[in-house]
Image (cartoon, helix red, strand yellow):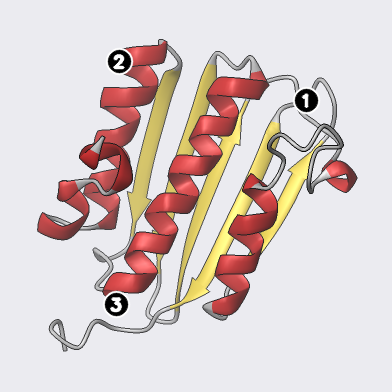
Amino acid sequence: LTFELSNPVLYQVGLEAAVESYLAERIQGQFGIKCKFKSEGPQSSLEEDVRVVLFQAVRELLANVVKHANASTVEVYISNTKDDLRIVVQDDGVGFDPTEIGPHPSGRGGFGLFNIRERLEYLGGNVKIESRRKNGARITMTVAIRMDAAAE
C-alpha cells in the first residue's frame, strides 16, 4: 500500500524512473497491457511537490487505462526542456467523450481527470485531453519547470 501511495523510486531516482518502473511493474506486469516509455531531454529536477503531483497524475491516468480503456497498448512520453516538462499518456483503447469529464451521476468516481486538471492548474500547468469513442485517448500534461532548491 505504501508503494501505491508514493513510489520510493520517485524520491530516490526521479520522476522518469518512477514512471518507467510503475509502467513495467504494475501496468505491464500485473495487467498485461503492453507499455512503451520514452523520455527526452535532461532528467527533470522538479520541486518535490511538482514531482509528486505529476507522478500521481500519471498513475491516475494509467489506472483509467486499466479500468476503462480496454487497451492493449499504452505509451508514456516525457519531454524536458529548459522551460517546461510535458507528459503524454496515450492508449489504443475504446476512447471516451471528453465533454463527459466530471462526477459520475451515480456518485461513484468520475473525478480523476477533473482532479488532475485542477492540480496541474494550481501548479501553473495545463492538461489537454484528446479522445473519441473507439479511437483511444491522448492526455498531455504540461507544467513550467520550477527547479528543486536542492538541485540548484
Q: Tell me where residue 114 sits by quadrant.
A: bottom right
Q: For the residue marked with disc 1, what is the amino acid?
A: Asn
Viewer-nearest of discs 3 and 1: 3
Under circle 3, the secondary element is loop
Label 3 vs 2, first from the N-terminus: 2
Which quadrant of the rendered structure holds the N terminus?
Answer: top left
Viewer-nearest of discs 1 and 2: 2
Under circle 2, the secondary element is helix
Q: Residue at x 61, y 54 (%)?
A: 140
Mark 2, Cα crowd under 10 Å, few <14 / some 14-19 / many 20+, is few
From the image, tell me which residue sits under label 2. Answer: 29
Mark 3, Cα crowd under 10 Å, few <14 / some 14-19 / many 20+, is some
Single out the residue that lies furthest toward the front: 107
Residue 135 shows which numbered tag? 1
Residue 123 lies, in percent from the top left, at 52, 78
Which quadrant of the rendered structure holds the C terminus?
Answer: bottom left
Q: CA distance from mark 3 to mark 2?
A: 30 Å
Under circle 1, the secondary element is loop
From the image, tell me which residue sits under label 3. Answer: 47
Q: CA distance from mark 3 to mark 1?
A: 35 Å
Q: For the residue marked with disc 2, what is the amino acid?
A: Gly
Q: For the residue marked with disc 3, what is the amino acid?
A: Glu
